[in-house]
Amino acid sequence: MLPGPFHRVHRSRPLQLVADLPPGADPRPRCHAVEVACEGSATVVAGFTDGAHRIEGWHDLETGHTGLDLVDADGVRTTHRSRRSGRSPHSAVRVGVTVTGDQATVLTHDGRAWTARARAPLPAELGDALRVHSNAAIRAQGRFGQLGVRDLHLVTHDDGTPFTRDGWAFLTLTHAGPGFFGTAHCGVWAFDPLSHRLEHRATLWFERDGAVHGDHAVHLVRHRDRWLLATSTWGDFDHDDVGIAWGSSEADLLAGEHVVPTVPLDLDDAVRGVGAWDPHLTLIDGHWHLALVVASEFFVFGPALLRARRPDALSDWELLGEAEGRTASEGTQILRLDDEWRVLASDGPDSAPALRRRFPVFDLTMREVGTLVALYPSNLPWPTLLEVDDGWLMLTFDGTPTAGRVAGYGTHGDFLVLSTNPARARARAGSGAGELL
């Protein structure tokens, strides 16, 4: 029997322009933020330099206009402004500048929320070691944090059971950036099933093809004395190529910042398509099983399940099944329910009418055997299930954006908790961070 029905009991929005964890020793992750106070000079300026190039976000305190200047090594300045969003209707109290992936962004805060005012592509020649500069008081500087979170996976043991410490479970989350997928990265968070509180514990970066990327939609697995992880290569997505990479580490990936070397997962003999993402690994009867999403074209995609032919190998994959009739389904996850292995997924709002906004459940041949009964949030939420003493929780996200039109798509979403025992879940949560629903 499938757990449910699920009722929403909690909503929160992890949002920090400057991360609450210090950067690691590796300077290569392209992920920086500085936040300054709107005071002093008539025009507040803040940004970054590698010694030759300068990134300057500025805000005119008198007119409310905000823009972003890039200055190259020859001193040539280019100014980027938004005609519709470049002026704040309310007085700004803070200015923030971020460098995320290949994009720089300037934002203002009016005491209630951050709004992106301008953005620009970074020069290819920009160095890795960036220093902050500003003519105003610096409130915070460090790694860029997140505007929202999405792509929730439980950190698991290789048998699929949740990895816990002191009663806390752990999640990998995509940290939404001020733009499309290349501005995002991966974080590891601790989750308290009682209070529904989230705590940021680690940040993960992935080295591949000689560069460091903020890949996301990550699954982190404890296997023997090391960590295995599988990532979706969204960090440098250019609308024609995304795949799955994997890596391993003996470091404590649940704390601090780490750069993990990865290599492509060879799936060519098992699936055909233009892309693959949302990997989830589980060891079943000694063989790794990989739930994933396969795209026949961008963006037409659906879930599939693979099995490694050789025991304890992450290669030589065979296709066990693909879900039929799917064109907008993702968020694949493997879970043991009532002594049966199941694959969970999410049918998005762009699916065929009969399949829209639902959480299908499949067997290991990818035959649908049921659906989870839960109100479907916006966007394409994942059905991440966690068993607790008095029922089940579903941990997911929605499509709530932030930061305005300049940032565009990719700034979602809110963190949501649903429960099969809502009265008990609300009572236990008490004053946990977030909104009880």
Image (cartoon, rainbow, N blue to C red):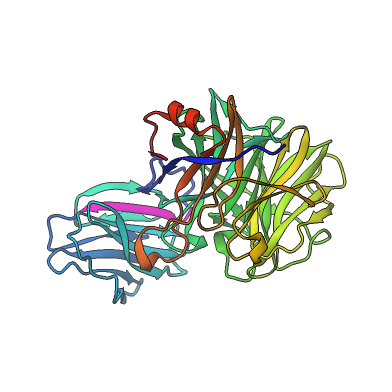
Which image quarter is the N terminus in?
A: top right
Q: Give me the residue at 72% from left, 30% from top.
A: 224
Number of on-image labels: 0
Q: Quadrant of residue 159?
A: top right
User: Looking at the image, is 1 positioned above or below residue 236?
Assistant: above
Q: Is residue 51 visible?
A: no
Q: Is residue 3 above or below residue 71?
A: above
Where's residue 137, x and y in %? Answer: 19, 50
Side of 380 where 400 appears, left or right? left
Pick whichever, 268 or 87, lies toward us: 87
Which residue sits furthest top?
A: 166
| Residue closest to the eye, 191 or 221 | 191
Q: Main secondary structure of the magenta part?
A: strand
Q: Which residues are magenta?
A: 29-37
Q: Is residue 105 magenta?
A: no
Using the rendered image of the protein, determine whether residue 45 is visible from the camera's viewpoint.
yes
Rendered location of residue 180, percent (x, y): 48, 64
> Residue sitting at 32 percent across and 71 percent down?
71
Q: Nearer the viewer, residue 428 or 82?
A: 428
Quadrant location, the C terminus: top left
The residue at the point 33 percent across, 75 percent down is 74
Location of residue 239 in the rendering, given as x and y in whole percent from the top left corner: 59, 70
Report whether 97 appears left or right of 326. Answer: left
